[in-house]
Image (cartoon, rainbow, N blue to C red):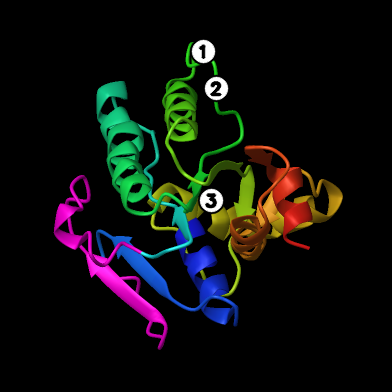
Amino acid sequence: MVGQGVLRECLLDPGVEKVLSVGRSPVGSKHEKLEGIVRKDLSDLGFAEGELQGFDACFFCLGVSSAGMKEADYRRVTYDLTLAVAQTLARLNPNMTFIYVSGTGTDSSERGRVMWARVKGATENALLKLPFKAAYMFRPGVIRPLHGIISKTRLYRILYTFAGPLIAAAGLVMPDWVTTTERVGKAMIRVAREGAPKPFLENRDINSLAK
């Protein structure tokens, strides 16, 4: 869902010259500045190193829900896969800014009781050690999808169907707790261009950067 949002903003932004989508399925969009790599196994991108060079930023939005998953399985997708991709990109594009979509409540200590928060925290910590120009961890809370964007996670689709109006209202009453796919996308592009004052960006920071 976040990936759809940032892709939309990249394609609308006249300052973005080229977008390369790398994922396990086609993005479903066509645009003159959009190219795509589709591969079921993204853990080894050696086959596409030539195509991955020359980029200023990576917006890493791939992820899965931890619901019903064992920690080892969740870690393989969330930590192992992310680091495999990031290490390749850091080697090919040392001047790249890497932006990782994490979440509110992520556990930087890596020792808390909540499994997903520990794994996300370990992933963030490892990414910040890689030799990128800069790396930023986006920690959105509740994200309201806009412009026809739909989550690929069934549970989230059900939630947004029934709680959409409530989430929209909450965004007016508690703006620091709710953001949108549009704001996240705009904030990511701005951070790629200008940087940010800190590596961990919560909902309040994301909404501010999107203005």
| Residue 146 spot, x, y in % from top left | 61, 68
Q: How many marks?
A: 3
Q: Taking the image as drawn, is residue 43 in sight?
A: yes
Q: Give the quarter of the image for residue 49.
A: bottom left
In what element is the residue under mark 1? loop
First in sequence: mark 3 vs mark 1: 1
User: 79 or 15, which lies in front?
Assistant: 15
Graded by Cα atoms within 10 Å as few (under 14), some (14 to 19) or many (20 or more), the crowding at tag 2 reads: many
Report, in whole angstroms, how far the alpha carbon at label 2 lies from the one at label 1. 7 Å
Q: Residue furthest bottom?
A: 32
Q: Taking the image as drawn, is residue 1 in sight?
A: no
State the extent of the magenta-drawn residues as a range: 26-53
Report whether 43 appears left or right of 79.
left
Report, in whole angstroms, how far the alpha carbon at label 3 lies from the one at label 1. 27 Å
Report whether 172 appears left or right of 135.
right
First in sequence: mark 2 vs mark 1: 2
Q: Which residue is mark 1?
A: 112
Residue 159 badge: 3
Is label 2 in contact with label 1 (beta carbons under 8 Å)?
yes
| Residue 62 spot, x, y in % from top left | 38, 50
Q: Which residue is mark 2?
A: 107
Please, what is the three-letter code of the amino acid marked with disc 1? Gly
